[in-house]
Amino acid sequence: MTEHHSDSYGVMGEFLTPEQLLNAAGKARQAGYKYISAYTPFPVEGLARAIGFPRTGVPLLTLLGGSLGCLGGFGLQYWCSVISYPINVGGRPLNSWPAFIPVTFELTILGAATFAVLGMLALNLLPQPYHPVFNVERFSHASSDRFFLCIESRDPKFHLAETTKFLQSVQAHHVHEVSNAE
Amino acid sequence: MSDIEPLENQSEIRRLEPLLEPGHTYASVTDKIAAVVLTRPPSMGWILGFSVSFCLVMALFVSIAWLMIKGVGIWGINIPIGWGFAIVNFVWWIGIGHAGTLISAILFLLNQKWRTSINRFAEAMTLFAVACAGTFPLIHMGRPWMAYYTMPYPSTMGLWPQFRSPLIWDVFAVSTYGTVSLMFWFVGLLPDLATLRDRAKNRTQQVIYGILSMGWRGSAHHWHRYQSAYLLLAGLATPLVLSVHTVVSFDFAIAIVPGWHTTIFPPYFVAGAIYSGFAMVLTLAIPLRKAYGLEDFITMRHLDNMAKVMLATGLIVAYGYAVEFFMAFYSGNKFDVFLAQQRLHGPYSHFYFALILCNILTPQLLWFEKVRRNIAALFVMSLVINTGMWLERFVIVVISLTRDFMPSAWGRYSATFWDYSTFAGTIGLFVMLIFLFVRTLPAIAIAEMRELVAHQSESGEGKS
């Protein structure tokens, strides 16, 4: 059966409720599958943990963006007002930092938000117009009312017939083979 | 919030009405919301409304073109009223935008499930209101093509913006606000764009929504990072929205003009912004749910809650007015006292009394449940409050500037035709963008509605 692996991305089970999907994902992990992905029309609590994906890098990137915005924002104003073009107005301090706070604050938010959004997209490898899962016709329901669990062919335990049987055994409503061919 | 227990008391039961009428499934919410965009032909009402607002946008273009030709002298501004309608409208529009961020960010952090069906178009409202707001300072510059002077860039003159000026703070605050609101909106839209892509019937729709959805496939990994980013954005947008209107109030409060130079301005501006913003959400939500049959999603409970938020923020605004008066007399500063008297007896006192009527007296009717549950009354109330909030900014700007320290510097202000046509034009722009939005993007967050369906089926109600 291994000859199927080259043109098959994996096997996908279709479920009716998030509970069935969570249950199936847990069983798949127990059965020793490692390369599992799940597709749902809305975020399902605990699903990321169930398929073994505990942390995201988004918060760290956001912190980084915020710090850059903060330091960059204050640095910009300091440099403009103190170094590049200092104007002595009646002996008032050049580094009038309280007046620089609003812009520093806004740029902190701007940096953090930009990094959060672009970081989320980049880590998700989006934009990505093509993906093998789109080859499954029923997959259009993943953005509406169906829940999918995909066991990928790169999994060492993957075996087309066996994995299909496994998905059927965990109450998959339908099982689809995901072809790799475009 | 979502667990509903049977209660004996009739009014208690009514208060805990569902956020989503029972009987909906994942597919039915998806179908119903996506159909507005994908399959429903535009109704006569839509075409009519779009046409009227389109004409107003044309009026805006004419007004701006004439302004470019003749200069800001076509407006009623003069010395001492250098800003006039431009700043009144700017503050009014930016304030309206704030309810969108409040609904999408603050209510999200507070885990208020009732925000779900109104956050999408409230965020759209934010974006469009910010676009209208930004127009005014830009065209008031006289030479708008020099607008980039407000940005720090290495110019051949070796000059930099004055970072100690609230006007430059405003540039940064409003442009950050616009950018973050756009990103927040887009992130929220991403899963719904994928839904539209998957359900699109013709090639054009498939291509457009396909590009916009960036290949979103609802993978658990995607959702995990998505939720993290969304939560962070909500956390960032919350202080942002407070800071933006605080900075807007600094445009006034940092100046020494009597009636402006007060510490109550930031909180009372923020409350006023949310007040007018919720009024605008109601102004939009009431016709929207009616026109597209979305009463199941935007229920009486939503309208009731929004009315309560308006009542609460309206009371904060009333407190602000009271403190302004009190502090004027308590400080004993003769200019402040004089200004307070001018509000009551000066040449613009009718504006002040109209403001009190619209913003403080009329909204007290919202204490009555009968009024909060009367859709027509709420709609009228929302218009009254929006008018009142516009009057508030007019009173602040015009009365203070026409009655500052020296009688020799006093003046009068009246708007010209071009002031009104520009203002009406931005209302047209706002309405036209809303009309386009409801036809091209899902006006209700579909993915979040599906979550609501899941919650309801867990708690054993809804979902037959």
Image (cartoon, grey):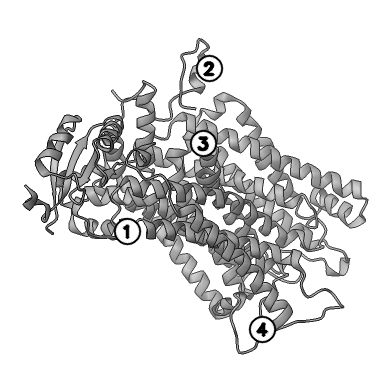
Give residue B19's position: percent from left, percent from top. 43, 30
Q: Give the residue at the far top of this rendering.
A: B8
**Residues at discs 3 and 2 both on one chain:** yes
Q: Amino acid at mark 3?
A: Asn
Q: Which residue is mark 3?
A: B111
Residue B415 in view in this figure: no
Q: Earlier in the sequence, mark 2 or mark 4?
A: 2
**Residues at discs 2 and 4 both on one chain:** yes
Determine whether label 2 and label 4 are within 8 Å by CB. no
The quadrant the C terminus of chain A occupies is bottom left
Q: Which residue is mark 2?
A: B11
Q: Amino acid at mark 2?
A: Ser
Q: Earlier in the sequence, mark 4 or mark 1?
A: 4
Give residue B130's position: percent from left, percent from top. 53, 59
Q: Which residue is mark 1?
A: B212
- Between residues B340 and B157, which one lies in front from this camera angle? B157
Spatial CA span between label 3 and label 4: 47 Å
Q: Amino acid at mark 1?
A: Leu
Q: Earlier in the sequence, mark 1 or mark 3?
A: 3
- Between residues B74 and B401, which one lies in front from this camera angle? B401
**Mark 1 nearby-residue class (10 Å; few <14, some 14–19, many ≥20):** some
